[in-house]
Image (cartoon, grey):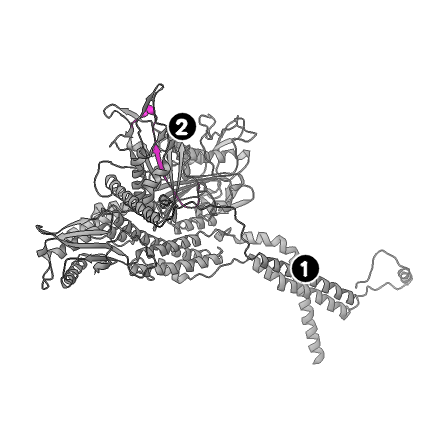
Amino acid sequence: MTIKTGDQESPEDSTSRADPKPSVKSPPPPETPAAVQTRFRVIAAFWAVIIFLGFPIWWKTTSIYRASLPIEEMVDWAGGKPFWQACRPVFPLDIHLATPSMQSADAQHLLRTTQHTLDDLNEFAAHHLRLKLANDSASDYGEGDLGADASGEVADTALTVRLLPQENLLGPRSELHAAATQLDVFYPPNQVPAPSSWNSPLSTYIAEELQGLYGEEKATIAHILHTAGLASTSPQLAEDISRRLRRSMKYAETYHLSFSLFTPGSRPSSWDIEAAVNEYVSPLLKALSPISDFTVDTQVQLYANFAPTAPKPEFDESEAAWTLKKEDLSAFVNAAEWPLNPSIGSGPTINFILYVPEPSQSPLIVKENRASSWIVPQWGGVFLLNPTLSNDKTGESNPAHLSQDSLGPAFMTFSHQLLTLLGTPSTPASLPLRLQTSIRVRAATLLLSASSTMGSLASLTESLPSIPIPATVATSVSTTLSHLSSTCSHLREGRFGAALASARVAETEAERSFFEKSMVGQVYFPDEHKVAVYLPLLGPIGVPLVVGLLKEIKRIIAGRKAKRAAAS
Amino acid sequence: MALLSRFLQAFALLLLAIAVSAEHTSNWAVLVSTSRFWFNYRHLANVLSLYRTVKRLGIPDSQIILMLPDDMACNPRNAFPGTVYSNADRAVDLYGDNIEVDYRGYEVTVENFIRLLTDRLDEDVPRSKRLGSDSGSNVLVYMTGHGGDQFLKFQDAEEIGAWDLAHAFEQMWEKKRYHELLFMIDTCQANTMYTHFYSPNIIATGSSEIDQSSYSHHADNDVGVAVIDRWTYYVLEFLETQVTSVTSKLNLGDLFDSYDESKIHSQPGVRWDLFTGQEQEGRLRTVVDFFGNVQNVEVENANATEPGSLKEDLAEIARLVEKWQKRDEEYADVLARNDTDESHSSSLHLKPKSKVGPTKMTEDGSWGKRLVGLAVVGVCSAIWIAGSVLGRKSG
């Protein structure tokens, strides 16, 4: 394309140099249209690759995938505490009234008046008791079916009240069955309310009795839902409730129970653990199964010493026992050396430690109140077992084997500690009723925590635009939302077992969506970083391409102008 | 009168609510050193000194996350193998025989640190490597390393920005993973690291202002390198000499007032404005609220009889046990009557463990994948053949 003026001398050049006329530097000959065409095509090809291949690939590979989430709905669920926009949790409890020896009209009337009194007494609208007459044929007096019929369309029966006439009574009296959800009310036959009266001692008595039974549950649920304190809640009860909520474990789908035998010497080296767990713990776990799943692990650790910094037990003459001070108990567990907290699965571990002191330090008790067990909030429980020492030639020693009977008190205590750590309320004095209460409390807690997780996720999505949101999160979110609303409708209809079941699903899915592993980008890139990354790469390539493009555009414009000039 | 008593009750409840909200139920500590190599001995010593202090004040290893990117104790240049000292007097061996490092070596990365804070970890990550804090936890985050304006270098090639950290804390707050958080950082231009925080209930303190270096305190001539940084040294001096037990009543105000710029050689900073109640309230938090461990052990009184007490519960559990035994017997009877000779009486209690055998990895869509692969190869070769044929024609 250009004329060679180099130092290579061709014969023609030498002849021209012989020419006396000085050579005029001639401009390059005009490009052939074919060459222009080729150059245009080359530039166009480069740019086509950039625009149609490079740019989409860059876009695709650097864009962050964000599945669309139903943000508004999520915010609604988490939204206003006083007026729930998506769901207003209510707890209608069905209470069956069994009146085997009463006319049905009388029974109806008693039911109405009692219900009336109950409604007057109630001040927390979300939690109310609904009385129903039990048809006697089908009254199986609730064997504590804790949400057994989760799919059933009927509301769970919370309690059966059996009215039994009894002669020689001055006023009504009641008796709560400890192993069933049944309350027996004995009344003098003359106290059946007359059809004309709207108030009778019997109905007032029943209403107050029921109110008392469910007082703590009501206060707990009000506390969880952040309703302003109920006026009837005594400060003492409120303090108890908040203390219990503080020490109980965070909810988990699965809890690992770990029973460990620690002893500073070589004995006891075996225990009847399987029998003891079967005997004392399994029934409770069975009863708790609608709330959570449990796995059980056990271990025996010999030669387990206290931490070197831990205070040593002291001998107390007056008690004739070795004692630990109460304030030192938190240092009792040698967290550094005792192999606790095994990393099994995903759920939290509840540790139960059975400690057998060495014979020279036996019996070992807590100084303040001679207790032998304590609870470590949100962690587990400890029981000091002082077995009868056996004397042999070498002196006193612990038995080599702990039988099931000797483990009895310890494992009963562990069961009690488990109930406490799971946040089971302390009243009423009937275990099935307490478990039912904890089902309702758990359902409320889960409903609240899953919906607040939804809110957190929504606000996170909005405030961090650089975070990726995979499709699985969207799926989890929609599962959560649907289960939340089904929880709500189950609650409204009084099916608490079913409500808890779907609240559990909602909670699990909500946690999964929030803690989705791929939602951690290298979150924030400042703009300087982007320049620093792209410039060394794109600069050297970009400059010739852009300059070529500009020149080509200039040429085309010039060509057009020339053509127009020629035409005019 | 009734109205008045109502008011009083409501007031008592309000007071109670305030008292409760100020309380925390567990303590967690995240202690991070971010630099490698022997000449950064002091950064590991900083972290290990803090580790020793929080452990002394009762936070168990299971609630301390310790991140050490290098192993000074076993460094071949260490004249005192197996030990790390933070003072030239070498009185306290920080490595000791009781130390649990959760993230070590190349595990200490920005990504792992952020994953730790936000708990976005694989399901199979053990619990000892997770920050299991909840809405009742006070969290202490201590970081040290080499940093600059709004960044802190991790190892050799990475850095964490002030925004990254702020976003991570915000995610923790959103998911209620802390109650109150104390952030401490000892690095050059440390105070720039907390400028972007925007989540509530954080108290932040750093060793030096923007454009200031943080200096090391002194070197040990036998170890051959500096052994501790100035700011950390004086914080530790306060913690070790004045906060002698978990019952100490000294508060954060006292700690921050103890900063002496003439000794530290840089201007330490404190940020209160995110804390509920601002500086007034924040100053009243005791040092052990963050450096110590609350563990209100509850001793059970074996003689109490109020509802929910041990005795009552034991009786109820005993009844439950009895009931289940009865049920078991009935069940066994039914089984026996049904002529099933398998004895299921004991298997009612515990589900038989399902045998977990080796299973094949999922093969969903493996055929589909093969087809896609084949198609891709086919298309590529078709293009190649077409190209060569066309090329021959035009050539």
Q: Which residues are magenta?
A: A343-363
Residue named by callout 1: A544
A141 lies above or below B109: below
Q: Amino acid at mark 1?
A: Pro
Give the numbered dot on residue A257. Answer: none
Along the line of sight, which residue is nearer the eye, A548 or B122?
B122
Q: Quadrant of the C terminus of chain A?
A: bottom right
Chain letter for mark 1, please: A
The picture quadrant where one finds residue A91 is bottom left
User: Which image quarter holds the N terminus of chain A?
Assistant: bottom right
Helix, strand or loop at mark 1: helix
Residue A520: where, in percent of width, then height?
A: 49, 51
Q: Position of residue B263 (x, y in %)?
A: 43, 33
The image quadrant that residue B247 belongs to is: top left
- Callouts 2 and 1 in the same chain: yes
Residue beneath the point at 63% across and 56% down? A538
Q: From mark 2 to mark 1, how far is it between C-alphas?
A: 78 Å
The label on residue A303 is: 2
**Lower position in the chain sequence, tag 2 or tag 1:** 2
Residue farthest toward the bottom in the current orientation of the protein: A568
Q: Nearer the viewer, residue A289 or B270?
A: A289
Q: Is residue B105 left or right of residue A544?
A: left
> In the figure, A200 relative to B62: above or below?
below
- Is A95 covered by the magenta stretch? no
Secondary structure beneath label 2: loop
Circle 2 chain: A
Q: Amino acid at mark 2?
A: Tyr
Residue at image position (54%, 26%) is B79
